[in-house]
Image (tube, rainbow, N blue to C red):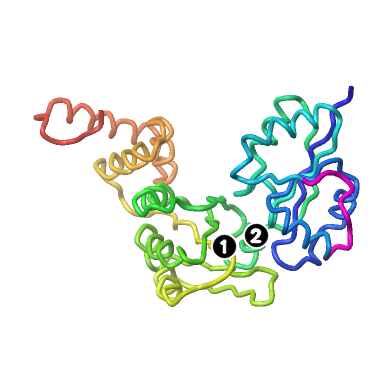
């Protein structure tokens, strides 16, 4: 029996007229439509004037693990499964990755219907450099974990793109201003493609003060990358930066490489600083913390 096909379909991030034409065709022909929210799917199909011919099932964070094997077996049996989320491309900070990985593991074909993307739309509208960027998704909710994550990328030179909930935006922008510097440029993109679309641009410090008054809607934050460093970093600072990355979960080898790249230094120079600090910690009285 020939295996089926998993189709990842992009859906509008706001204006339903942005739906790709192929989306309607896939909705009408799929054997199974797996939707993050079946009620939203119903509204979308009504707007597009189509009716799914196949079975509609829910596929969201709460049942993703349990439903994935069921969908993979349907795919293995020859079904065409269409995966849609509430907005944008599946698996980009939305359900989908688990199903794609499982399908690939079974050598099942995976294809996509390209569609709107909040990441690329916000990036293009931000007015910040777009030649190199990285997507960081949602930051941790806990302040300490969020601070650690931001510290990890404080020296990142590529433009950064984040998703954020409106009720956490002010805290996030304040944390970014602390980690990146209040003058680092950024753009808050709100309600993209919708009636009240707004792009607020400015230094992080000013944006944090603005957001403190309250912001509504779907939020994407774009932050300028770090400027090329011209500062002379001493060995202690290099070691500190490696430690921060290690504490965040990076392997020492990877942390050294990242610190060296961001500082524009040979990896050997950072490695030597770390080794020297480690040796110094071993020979010093054991009443403090050092590299282990």
**Which region shows up in magenta?**
47-56
For marks 2 and 1 on the same chain, the one whose residue lies earlier in the sequence: 2
Q: In the picture provided, is 240 more to the left or to the right than 126? A: left
Q: What SS does tag 2 mark?
A: helix
Q: In the picture provided, is 162 more to the left or to the right than 243? A: right
Alpha carbons under labels 2 and 1: distance apart: 7 Å
Q: What SS does tag 1 mark?
A: strand
> In this picture, is 16 found above or below 274?
below
For label 1, the residue is: 220
Q: Are marks 2 and 1 in contact (CB under 8 Å)?
A: yes
**Residue at (86, 40) in percent of width and height:** 31
For label 2, the residue is: 118
Image coordinates of residue 149 in percent, x first then y, are: 41, 48
Image coordinates of residue 9 in percent, x first then y, are: 77, 49
Quadrant in which residue 34 is drawn:
top right
**Residue at (45, 73) in percent of width and height:** 211
- The crowd level at tag 2 (other Cα within 10 Å; few <14, some 14-19, many 20+) is many
Q: Quadrant of the C terminus?
A: top left
Q: Main secondary structure of the magenta part?
A: loop
- The crowd level at tag 1 (other Cα within 10 Å; few <14, some 14-19, many 20+) is many
**Residue at (45, 56) in percent of width and height:** 226
**Residue at (23, 29) in percent of width and height:** 278
Image coordinates of residue 65 in percent, x first then y, are: 62, 35
Quadrant in which residue 191 is drawn:
bottom right
Near-viewer residue (41 or 228): 41
Residue 197 highlighted magenta (yes or no): no
């Amino acid at each position: 029996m020939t295996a089926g096909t998993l189709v990842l379909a992009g859906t509008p991030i706001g204006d339903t007229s942005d739906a790709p034409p192929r989306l309607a065709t896939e909705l009408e022909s799929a054997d199974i439509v797996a939707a993050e929210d079946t009620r939203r799917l119903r509204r979308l199909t009504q707007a597009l004037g189509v009716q799914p011919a196949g079975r509609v099932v829910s596929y969201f964070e709460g049942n993703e693990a349990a439903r994935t094997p069921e969908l993979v077996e349907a795919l293995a049996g020859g079904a065409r499964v269409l995966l849609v989320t509430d907005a944008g491309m599946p698996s980009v900070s939305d359900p989908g990755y688990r199903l794609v990985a499982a399908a690939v593991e079974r050598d099942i074909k995976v294809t996509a219907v390209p569609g709107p993307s909040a990441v690329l739309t916000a990036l293009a509208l931000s007015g910040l450099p777009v030649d190199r960027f990285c997507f960081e998704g949602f930051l941790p909710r806990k302040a300490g974990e969020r601070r650690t994550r931001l510290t990890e990328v404080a020296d990142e030179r590529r433009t950064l793109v984040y998703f954020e909930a409106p009720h956490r935006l002010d805290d996030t922008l304040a944390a970014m201003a602390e980690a990146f510097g209040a003058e680092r440029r950024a753009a808050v993109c709100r309600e993209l493609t919708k009636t009240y679309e707004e792009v607020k641009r400015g230094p992080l410090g000013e944006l944090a003060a603005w957001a403190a008054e309250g912001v509504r809607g779907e939020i994407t934050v774009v932050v300028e990358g770090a400027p090329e460093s011209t500062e002379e970093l001493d060995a202690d600072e290099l070691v500190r930066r490696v430690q921060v990355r290690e504490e965040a979960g990076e392997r020492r080898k990877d942390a050294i490489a990242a610190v060296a790249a961001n500082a524009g230094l040979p990896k050997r120079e950072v490695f030597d600083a770390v080794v020297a600090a480690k040796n110094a910690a071993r020979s010093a009285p054991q009443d403090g913390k050092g590299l282990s």
